[in-house]
Image (cartoon, rainbow, N blue to C red):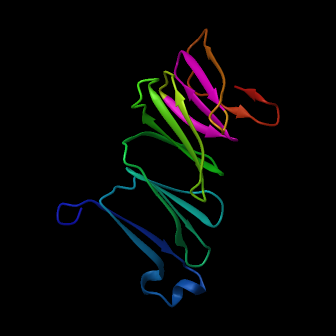
Amino acid sequence: IKDGIPQSDIVFYHFGSVGKAEDDYVVSRTTYQECVMPEIYFAGNACAVAVADNGFAVCKGTDKPKESVLVSFEQEIISCFHDDDRIGFLFADITGEAEYRMEIYNYRGKRDAERIVEADFDEIKMQEGQVLMFSEKECHVFTKSGRKRFDSPYEKAVQDIFYFAGFRKYL
C-alpha cells in the first residue's frame, strides 16, 4: 500500500547470465495500481499468471518476461481456479437466474466460456479441463466450455475429488 492505495509488483529474477547485467538480477518488473495480487503461478515454462482481486495478468517470456495479457473485471471475484491451459472465475449472478456466473479464459485472454451455475460447494478446482466443484456432501462437474457434465450427492463425506483423464474416471 502506497499513499493509501494498494499496489502489487510482479518481479522476475534471472540468476543466469541474463540477470548478471541487471541490478539484483531483476530482469522485469511491472507495477499494478489499485489491486492486490494474492496468487502467482506458472502455467508452463514461459507463462506466469498473476491473479488479482479484480482480474488477471499473463506474463510470457523466458529471459525477460513481459505482460502479454491483462483482463480486468468490474464485478467482485468470488473464486478462482486454473489448470495449465485455462483460468476460471466465479462471480455472483446478478440476473437472479442462479447463484453464480462462471467465466473461463485461455492464457491469451480470450473468454472461452460463460455460464450461469447453480451449485453448492466448498472447494473448486480445474483438472484436465474439467471444473470440479465439491463439498463433503455433493459434487458438480463442468466441462471447459462450462456445460454441466454431472452432479451427484455422496453417501459418505468426501475430502477431495480428482479427475483421471486417461480413464475418464473421478475419484
Quarter in which the N terminus is drawn: bottom left
Quarter in which the C terminus is drawn: top right
- Identified at 29% across, 59% down, the residue is 34
| Residue 160 percent across, percent down from the top left | 58, 28
Q: Which residues are magenta?
A: 123-142
The image quarter containing residue 17 is bottom right
- Identified at 66% across, 31% down, the residue is 162
Up/down of 68 relative to 91, above or below: below
| Residue 126 percent across, percent down from the top left | 61, 39
Up/down of 41 relative to 162, above or below: below
Q: Residue furthest bottom?
A: 21
Q: Residue furthest left?
A: 3
29 and 93: which is toward the camera: 93
- Identified at 82% across, 31% down, the residue is 167
- Per the picture, the main secondary structure of the magenta-coloured stretch is strand
- Image check: 151 left or right of 40? right
**Is residue 127 located in the magenta-colored stretch of the structure?**
yes
Q: Residue furthest top?
A: 155
**Is residue 73 located in the magenta-colored stretch of the structure?**
no
143 and 44: which is toward the camera: 143
